[in-house]
Amino acid sequence: LSSYPSYIDLLPAIQTCNITNLPENYFLKYYLYHALTWPQLSFVAVVRPRAGYKSGSIAGDYPKVVGYVLAKMEEEPTDGLQHGHITSISVMRTHRRLGIAERLMRMSQRAMAESHRANYVSLHVRVSNTAALRLYRDTLGFEVQKVEEKYYADGEDAYAMRLNLENQW
Ligand code: ACO
């Protein structure tokens, strides 16, 4: 038995990271469904406790989650093409602009292509989300497919974006 927590042990902390950073939240069982169904596709960024640190509590011995990407394969693709989907990604404010989101995205994209032969990866993002748009479009090379009107619960539109994964690795 390893004393280091597994990805599943970290799910409550991943959920807390999501609730802290985004208004789109999910039941814990939805995180678990991702982890059990597509274990290769989701990743977490953690800060380990300092060496020699003695907390005395179980929670205190856990690494702190500072970012995650929650990803899946589309189960019934309407276009008949195997493809991945980014359900959610966020990084804690304290750890932004360090390249964490870019790294999480690239790891997930590669796993989609290698483990599931994904043709492309899709996602939705708020039209007002400048930081995420810069990450997807300028850093990673995603393209806008269409605008989905009133996609979000508060009525904001979403860009439906996708990135071709063929011949990348
Ligand atoms: N303003 C402009 N460009 C930005 C910003 C910003 N605030 N943040 C990231 N970028 C772009 C830059 O091009 C950056 O490269 P550079 O730093 O060399 O200029 C590039 O993205 C990579 O940045 P990272 O450091 O990898 O991004 P970070 O780890 O800071 O995370 C994220 C970016 C996830 C968007 C973060 O700001 C966040 O958690 N925001 C709140 C949650 C969120 O909006 N999540 C996405 C919702 S959509 C969805 O989940 C599918």
Image: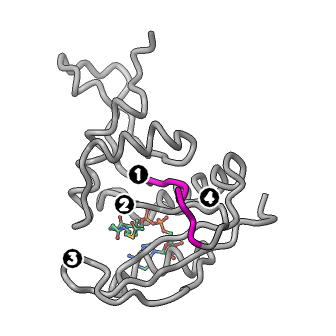
Q: Which residue is mark 1?
A: 68
* Circle nearer the N terminus (4, 3): 4
Look at the numbered disc 2 and say if its residue's Cβ is closer than 8 Å to ligand 1: yes
Q: Which mark is residue 109?
A: 4
Q: Which mark is residue 90?
A: 2
Give the residue drawn at x 28%, y 86%.
150
* Circle nearer the N terminus (2, 3): 2
Label 1, label 4: how far apart the Cα atoms are: 14 Å
Q: Amino acid at mark 3?
A: Ala
Q: Amino acid at mark 4?
A: Gln
Q: Residues within 10 Å of mark 4 (few under 14, many from 20)?
A: many
Report the mark closest to the observer, 1 or 4.
4
Q: Residues within 10 Å of mark 2 (few under 14, many from 20)?
A: many
Label 2, label 4: how far apart the Cα atoms are: 16 Å
Q: Determine contact: label 4, label 3, CB under 8 Å.
A: no
Q: Which residue is mark 3?
A: 153
79 or 26: nearer the viewer = 79
Q: Determine contact: label 1, label 4, CB under 8 Å.
A: no
Label 2, label 1: how far apart the Cα atoms are: 6 Å
Look at the numbered disc 4 and say if its residue's Cβ is closer than 8 Å to ligand 1: no
Q: Amino acid at mark 1?
A: Tyr
Give the residue drawn at x 40%, y 77%.
125
Q: Secondary structure at mark 3?
A: loop
Q: Secondary structure at mark 1?
A: strand
* Circle nearer the N terminus (3, 1): 1
* Rendered image quadrant of residue 142: bottom right
Over which residues does the magenta segment extend? 68-78
Give the residue drawn at x 55%, y 81%.
137
Q: In the image, is 89 to the left or to the right of 144?
A: left
